[in-house]
Amino acid sequence: MLTEPSGVLSSFDAFARAEMPRLLGLARLLCGNDHDAWDLTQDTLIQVSRHWQRIDADRNPGAYARRCVVNLNHNRLRRLSREVLTASVPDRSDKGSELGQENLDEWLDVALQRLPWKQRAAVTLAYLEDLSVRDIAFVLDCSMSAAKTHLSRGRDSLRQAAAAESAERTPRPAPQLRSADHGN
């Protein structure tokens, strides 16, 4: 077994403890469920730990970790696209589990899951992580103009979903009944 300097392990441990909630929240919004989010976060931390000595502390290891989350999720989606779908739908876990998503409306969760993965990642990184377009482009490994396009299209799709949800929730006036004129 290889031994690592204790400073390297303690710096990674501190990083993992500090970044875990953010990475988990990002993974939850990208995956749409708690189980896959936990798996994705753990896979990310494993990948980051493997390269920890190479990651320069000045280069923002948090950005590297977020990029890993997005890339690993993309790989997961590609694997899922090759899976055979079954006739039965699995039960979904309750909203608002240990990830603190009780305020995420179901329609928003569904709308996010319907977005293409780069749009979903761009919107999630912009609003959950409060990243700039430049940082989103870095995490998605694309140009700034492509990141702006993904963000704009994702926002437009979510606006349309919000409008549809609002229209669905708006009570419609009851039909006016006309009194029958019996010609007395």
Image (cartoon, rainbow, N blue to C red):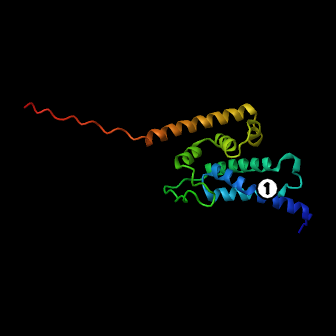
| 71 shown above or below 151 | below
Q: Is residue 20 left or right of residue 54?
A: left
Q: Which residue is mark 1?
A: 47
User: Residue 124 location in percent, x, y?
Assistant: 66, 44
Q: Residue furthest left?
A: 184
Of residues 62 and 36, the one nearer the viewer is 62
- Of residue 105 and residue 153, the one placed in the foreground of this image is 105
Q: Residue at x 86, y 59 (%)?
A: 11
Residue 70, given in percent of the width and then of the height, sits at 71, 47
Location of residue 94 by image quarter: bottom right
Image spot of residue 42 (x, y percent) = 73, 59
Q: Examine the rendered structure and indicate whether residue 45 appears above or below residue 58.
A: below
Helix or strand or loop: what does disc 1 sit on? helix
Q: Is residue 123 above or below residue 93?
A: above
**Quarter occupied by the N terminus:** bottom right
Q: Residue at x 71, y 56 (%)?
A: 21
Label 1 environment density (alpha carbons within 10 Å; few <14, some 14–19, many ≥20): some
